[in-house]
Amino acid sequence: MWRLPVTVCRITNFLGEQTSAAVLRRAMAAADGLMPPSTIGPDRQVNRDIWRSRSGHDFAVPELLSCIDEVQEAVEHTLGVSCQGTEPTYGLISYNDGDFYAPHQDSTPEFHPERMLKFVYFVHRTPRPFTGGELRVFDIALPLHTEGSVSWEDRTWRDWEPEHDSIVFFRPSAWHEVRKVSCPTKQPEDSRFAINGWLGAPHMTSN
């Protein structure tokens, strides 16, 4: 069995104390307005067996996009992708007590093939009012022989802590999941917030 690690670029203290605090205040205000449940698939169905969270797609973070623009060239070079000349798509995701996202891909040849670069920016209250919520990125597992097969038990992974004011970049074709969150207060403002987004291939736009 070949196990090929998936490259993840992680940057801490990405926006700085004041700017990240401002983004957090806006995220908490959005969560207090009871964002709708997250949906999956082209039909935008709610399936709480696969994804349990809340999403806000009209959440504007120009300061985050500006900082991403500053590091984009270096990240693309590291991950071996090119997304120049495209506009990002993104949204705010809130994970509270018991929420999770089962293993999945954000991009396949059939589903969102234009997504070339994934980013997740983490923001939350400190000290962290929840446990869990790690971003688990699975390594690529390939059989040594063509007649072989790969099961989930064959895969290895790395967990990335949802550290406040940190961001990770990776290819959206990588299998990944959000581990279950435990938030004892169950209050919206104590959620694990993430700004989830993608950059597309040149001259293509996201669905």
Image (cartoon, helix red, strand yellow):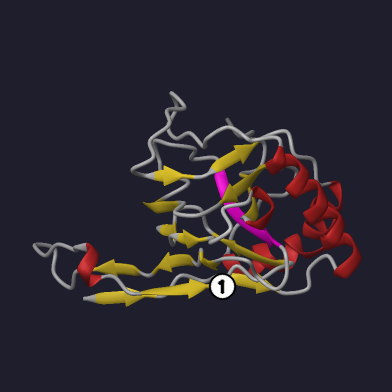
| Of residues 130 and 207, the one drawn nearer to the viewer in this rendering | 130
- Most frequent secondary structure within the magenta stretch: strand
**Left or right placement of residue 80 versus residue 195 in this view:** left
Q: Which residues are magenta?
A: 115-124
Residue furthest toward the left? 147
> Residue 131: horizontal and vertical position, in percent?
53, 69
The residue positioned 77% from the left and 58% from the top of the image is 68
Report which residue position mark 1 lands on. Answer: 161
> Is 159 part of what is drawn in magenta?
no
> Residue 49: horizontal and vertical position, in percent?
33, 43
The residue positioned 67% from the left and 36% from the top of the image is 203
> Residue 128: horizontal and vertical position, in percent?
65, 70
Asked whether residue 87 is in view, the answer is no
**Left or right placement of residue 26 versus residue 54 in this view:** right
The residue positioned 86% from the left and 53% from the top of the image is 63
| Of residues 93 and 68, the one drawn nearer to the viewer in this rendering | 93
Q: Amino acid at mark 1?
A: Glu
